[in-house]
Structure formats: C-alpha cells, structure tokens
Amino acid sequence: MAQAQRVAVVGLGGMGRRMAARILQAGLPTMVWNRSPEPARRLGEQGAQVADAVPDAVRAADVVITMVTDADAVYSIATDQSMLAAMPDGAIWAQMSTIGVAGTERIAALVAEQRPGVVLLDAPVAGSLGPAEQGKLAVLASGPEEARERIAPVFEAVGQRTVWAGPVGAGSRMKLVNNLLLAFINEGLAESLALGRALGLDRSAVLDAFRGSPIVAPWAAEKLERIGRDDYSPQYPLRLALKDVRLALDGVPDASRFTVAERLGVEWQQLVDRGLGDEDLTVVTRALED
C-alpha cells in the first residue's frame, strides 16, 4: 500500500530536486513541477512525470510536497497557481519549505478556510545539499497524528529520521531553533579560525587541531574540511541562512533579548551586501580572515 503513494514535488531548487530524486529512488510514483523547466526535465530522465502546470502536478497526488524559497512563494503557488484548489480531498500537503512562524500560520489559515479536506503537515527539513542527496535529512514534522503512517514512506525516502514536534506550526518553530544553532556554530568556526590567523597561527595547524576534537560535531567537521579547501560553493547559501536567522527573531515577541543573534544578522547582512549571499554560509570565515 505504501508503494502506491503518488507524490507531487513542487519546487526543484537545490533541496527540492534532490528530495524528489530520493523519492523516485524509493519507488514512489513521482510527478514534478518547477518554475524553470530544466530541473524537472532532468528528473523526467530519471523516471519522474513532468507537469506543465502546478494543477497538473497535484491533481492525482496522494502527497504534495512544496519546497520553495519563502512564504510568499508558497502562498502564490497555493493560490495564484491554483495548487490548493486542484488537490484532491484527503490528500496530504507536506509544506517542507522554511517559512517561519507567521508564514506557517498564514498557510494553515488558508487551508482551513479554503480546503479543510486537505491534510496539512508542516515539515521543514534539517540538513543541506549533501544530506539531501544521500537521503539523510532530518524531517522536523508537525500535524495530525493520523497522517503519520501515510506520510512515513515519503519522509523515510528523504530523511534518516523524522521528529514529530506537535501540531502544525511546531515543525517550523523547531526548524528555526535548529538553524539558529547552525548559525552560531558557523560563526564560531569563522571567528575561531580568524582569531587563529590574527594570533599568527597557520590555518592548517588550527584545522588539524580541530580534527577529531570532541567539541566538533559532524556538521562542523564537514564544514571545516571544505573551508580547508577554500570551497565555499553553496550547500546552505549565506542569504538563506540570514533569512532563517531573521525568521527566528521575527517569531518571538521580544527579539531584543537575543542580542547575539541580532548582531550576527547585522554582520551577515553586510556580507550579503558585499555580494557573498549566494556562497555557502562558511564564506563568513573567508570574510573575517581577509
């Protein structure tokens, strides 16, 4: 029965394309749509069905995944491009983009008002391009408990674990908590390496000292290896990391308490203004070392 789940993936950017490929590899019938056709065409060569329009992608789907840039894009696809109207009753909409607290509440209100027969899951993912390609994301899911069994084959295809956080909205809150920690880890790596240079240490010696250290988690260790190669190709672009820091601050009533996060946002905005926004967030290291 699980293998009969028909999945539509709407949005085939860096993450969405890799997630759709993993769903295909799991043997689930997959329909794809993207604003620019090339990513969809490549998935079509791997066995996906390619839709010309969003309604065509979702009309017969059991599960619809949206993976786009922000809340406005999700809302536009749902309304202006008629995705929500075209979904069948009983279908699951797994909204997996990172759109923050207010964005998720806006989508939940839209579904409740216009299509209460659609089951909304709020399920952003933790991880970047490498884990997405390997099917090792963490899915931070929230929504009705009765949908868990139905969605399990899809989440298992894209992730190595699913954390159920509570009702719709809890998944997005958990994603902001997760991404703020990543932001702090990244800043810690960048400032530590920059301090090493300022103290006259060779960068390779500092990197060697970090290797195998109990304070360096696997995510940080992989980032340090890329920094050591001066590889700042985007896995998690700085502009998106900055967006997520701002979503986290926007989601709390008194953001002024989070002074370090606010200062980090100011620093990263300056780097984006310098044209570094499309590089990996580890480019902060290069900027501080210059």
Image (cartoon, helix red, strand yellow):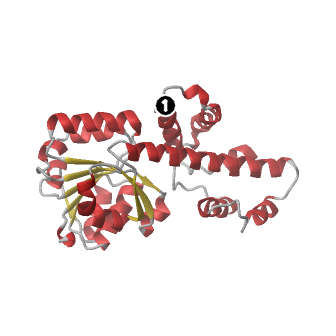
Asked whether, in this view, residue 236 is left or right of residue 121, the answer is right
Residue at the spot x=31%, y=58% of the render? 38
Neighbor class of circle 1 (other Cα within 10 Å; few <14, some 14-19, many 20+) is few
Residue at the spot x=33%, y=45% of the render? 167
Per the image, the residue denoted by label 1 is 252
Provide residue 33's location: percent of width, then percent of height.
24, 54
Determine the residue located farthest toward the right in the rendered image: 200
Q: From the viewer's perspective, is residue 143 above or below residue 28?
A: above
Provide residue 130's location: percent of width, then percent of height.
49, 64
* In-front residue for pair 141/290: 141
- Which quadrant is the C terminus positioned in? top right
* In-front residue for pair 175/27: 175
The disc labelled 1 sits on which kind of residue?
Answer: Val
Number of marks? 1
Asked whether, in this view, residue 17 is left or right of residue 89, the answer is right
Residue 33 seen in this snapshot: no
Residue at the spot x=82%, y=51% of the render? 197
Provide residue 184's location: percent of width, then percent of height.
63, 45
Asked whether, in this view, residue 68 is left or right of residue 189, the answer is left
Provide residue 142's location: percent of width, then percent of height.
34, 49
Q: Considering the numbered disc 1 on the image, is that residue within a helix, a strand or a loop? A: loop
Residue at the spot x=49%, y=38% of the render? 243
Residue 198 seen in this snapshot: yes
* In-front residue for pair 164/212: 164
Asked whether, in this view, residue 24 is left or right of residue 128, the answer is left
- Which quadrant is the N terminus positioned in? bottom left
